[in-house]
Structures are given as C-alpha cells and as structure tokens.
C-alpha cells in the first residue's frame, strides 16, 4: 500500500495497493529484498506471577 500525505500532521490517503503475490515477489526480488518473510521465533511461555513477583512471591501477601 502506498500512503500519500503532504504533511505528517494531516490525514493520509491510500492511493494504490499491490495485491498480486507474483507482482509483490517480483518487486521485492528486484529491490534485493527477501520475497519470503523471515521464520517466526518460537513462542516463549511467561509465568506472569513469577514475572511480577520475581524471586520473592511473599511481597504481595
């Protein structure tokens, strides 16, 4: 998508959108950019109570 604005404080308008995957891949390849997205990082489980309390869970009680 391409946004056009005369001033960063004004509202932008969408003037074009490229939706064809083959065209997007061709443009990215021409620009020397990877046509495929990078792999996703694995999910990380966070224990919210432990993250909030740290090593001392008694501070809350």
Image: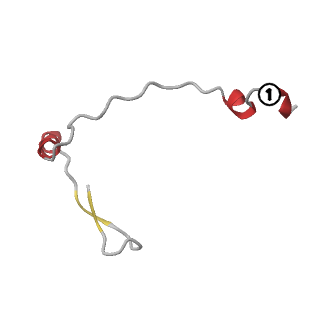
In the image: residue 17, left or right of residue 61: left
Give the residue number, with chain letter if any, for mark 1.
56
Within the image, what quadrant is residue 21 found in?
top left
Q: Is residue 13 left or right of residue 27?
A: right
Residue 47 as seen in the image, left or right of residue 6: right
In the rendered image, the vertical position of residue 30 relative to residue 58, given as above or below: below
Q: Position of residue 28 (x, y in %)?
A: 17, 44
Q: Which quadrant of the rendered structure holds the N terminus? A: bottom left
Q: Residue drawn at (71%, 27%), measured in percent from left and top?
A: 50
Residue 52, by quadrant, is: top right
**Residue sitting at 41 percent across and 28 percent down?**
41
Q: In the rendering, at what x and y percent does residue 13 appear?
A: 30, 66
Q: Is residue 29 above or below residue 2?
A: above
Where the C terminus falls, by quadrant?
Answer: top right
Kindly identify the residue that appears in the image at 23 percent across and 34 percent down. Answer: 36
Q: Is residue 56 above or below residue 15?
A: above
Q: Within 10 angstroms of label 1, few (less than 14), some, or many (20 or more) residues? A: few
Q: Residue furthest front?
A: 55
């Amino acid at each position: 998508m391409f946004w056009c604005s005369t001033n960063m404080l004004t509202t932008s308008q969408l003037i074009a959108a490229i939706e064809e995957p083959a065209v997007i891949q061709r443009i990215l390849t021409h620009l020397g950019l990877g046509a495929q997205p990078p792999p996703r990082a694995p999910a990380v489980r966070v224990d919210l109570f432990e993250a909030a309390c740290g090593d001392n869970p008694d501070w809350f009680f």
